[in-house]
Amino acid sequence: MKAQLVLESRVPLVEPAVEFVKSFGLKAGLTKEEAVELALCADELLTDVVRFAFPKEIGKFVLTLEVTPSQVELIVRELGEPFDPDAHPYNPERARREGKFEGAGIEVIRELSDGFIFLNKGRAGKEFRIVKKVNAPHITEIFEGREKELLAEPEKTAHYCIAPVKPDDAEDISRLIYRTYRYTYPKEELYYPKKVRRFIESGKKFGVIVRTKEGEAVGYFAVIVKEDSRIGEVGEAVVSPGHRGRGIMKMMMSSLIGMAKERGLLGLFGEAITVHTISQRVNARFGFKSTALMLGTFPEARIVGIREDYGQRISVVIDFLHLIERKKAGVYLPKEYSKILREIYQNMGIEVVNRREKRAELPGTSKLELSVNFPMGTAVIVIERPGQDLKERVERKVRKLFSSGVEVVYADLPLDRPETKRAVKVLRELGFVFSGLVPLFHRERDYLRLQKVKGNYDFKKIELYSKMAKKIAKRVKRELNEVAQER
């Protein structure tokens, strides 16, 4: 669910906008108290924008609200006068002593929200992001006092029943996840039946559930449809421990591929964790091809029954399956990555047509899109059009994101634009390294993905299955070592 308002910087418009934010929060699953807190954050922020961003004129700014199963995010973008809230910290002692409450509004936002970040985009203006978590009962709270029932493993059966996932399956899905992984499954929202139900009802997810003849859930697999492209992620896969090795995963994957084709998706991708190769092997069996290695996608966690002491954030391999015939790809290959990108395309059975164009002047302003996943500690910058301000804006974004708790920033560059060749050089200067190819990832176009990480990664702990994944990892490791030497 997403909503967007374009507002003039007039004081009378603040109140109705704040009321809209409150109503939207309630619809998104916030409690009345949480929705009021989000509305108070909006009131403080919008009032500051109206009063200070446009002091001598009536300007316009954009308010966007976006919902995931776990959070509501309020984003305000404006092109008013320069302002940096970090330069005006709230000082309570000064407020009591002198009656000056500079920075108090921003302090209120920080206290009432679950995440606040300010991004100065230079000539492209300013961006404020406020996050409010959507809370719901954990599956262990629902089954409090009934631990044995929650953990009971269903008896094996000769025949299993598979069916499309429905909202009423939400509690069984959460039980299955908890029974299998306890608290260690990376996608935390799956432990909250209300969040699972909301996501299924939204239509952004479809999947299958496998049950015994007694109706006990023993398998679950879902596809999350990307919002900006006609592809989907095969994620959230689980088979109850006592029912593994009985063909359940194969049954579910076959069904999902068929359902994806029926819905007109162009491709499927999986983010296979690298603490083991099980999911990578399953993907390969169904024709998925490795295209990228993303470091630190998930926070460090113990994986029940697999690895108890991993000791670093969990990385993933992107495996991709085209659902349409695709013989050629016309792209602009940066020379730094020409060879390995050709190999990745060739591994998918796609011939590369390397486009050539005369060097053109970059526009003054870059066109960037930012997506932040605060719970996971990751962010993606989609660079739709590189401009002369690219280095300044990306450097500023990365610095702010890292200081706000983000651990990894991925940058996606369109391979159908010649400016990408020059953008690669800029990002490499900022310490970004290779990640791989993400096919059809945004608006049905191929992108080169680079990544910048905090901390170090022990590649001996990153388990890979395919030859291509190992080749990509070798390149990533080499570039990380080069960056470390340059520091």
Image: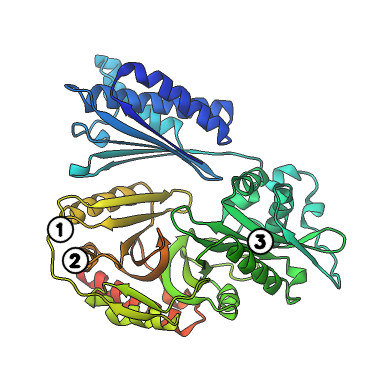
Classify residue 170 as left or right of residue 376.
right
The residue that appears at 52% across and 32% down in the rendered structure is 25
Residues under labels 2 and 1: Cα distance? 9 Å
Task: Name the residue: 33% across, 55% down.
Answer: 381
Q: Which quarter of the picture shows residue 106?
A: top left
Left or right side of 359 for 53: right
The percent coordinates of residue 454 (x first, y second) are: 34, 60
User: To which residue does mark 3 refer?
Assistant: 181
Identified by mark 1, the residue type is Leu
Q: Quote the CA–CA distance across marks 2 and 3.
A: 45 Å
Relative to 329, residue 106 above or below: above
Q: Nearer the viewer, residue 192 or 262?
A: 262
Report which residue position mark 2 lands on: 422
| Disc 2 secondary structure class | helix
Q: Is residue 302 visible?
A: no
Q: CA distance from mark 1 to mark 3?
A: 50 Å
Residue 452 visible in the snapshot: yes
Residue at the (52%, 81%) spot, across then down: 465
* Amino acid type shown at disc 3: Tyr
Mark 2: few/some/many CA within 10 Å (<14, 14-19, 20+): some
**Is the C terminus in the top left, top right, bottom left or bottom right quadrant?**
bottom left
Pick the residue in front: 327 or 137: 327
Task: Where is residue 329? Give x, y as percent.
Answer: 36, 75
Dots 2, 1 in contact, CB < 8 A: yes
Kind of element beneath mark 3? helix
Residue 350 in which image quadrant: bottom left
Q: From what the image shows, is residue 191 above or below residue 53? A: below
Q: Nearer the viewer, mark 1 or mark 3?
A: 1
Mark nearest the camera among 2 and 1 is 1
Amino acid type at circle 2 is Arg
Work out whether mark 1 precedes mark 3 in sequence or the reverse, and give the earlier one. Answer: 3
What kind of element bears circle 1?
loop
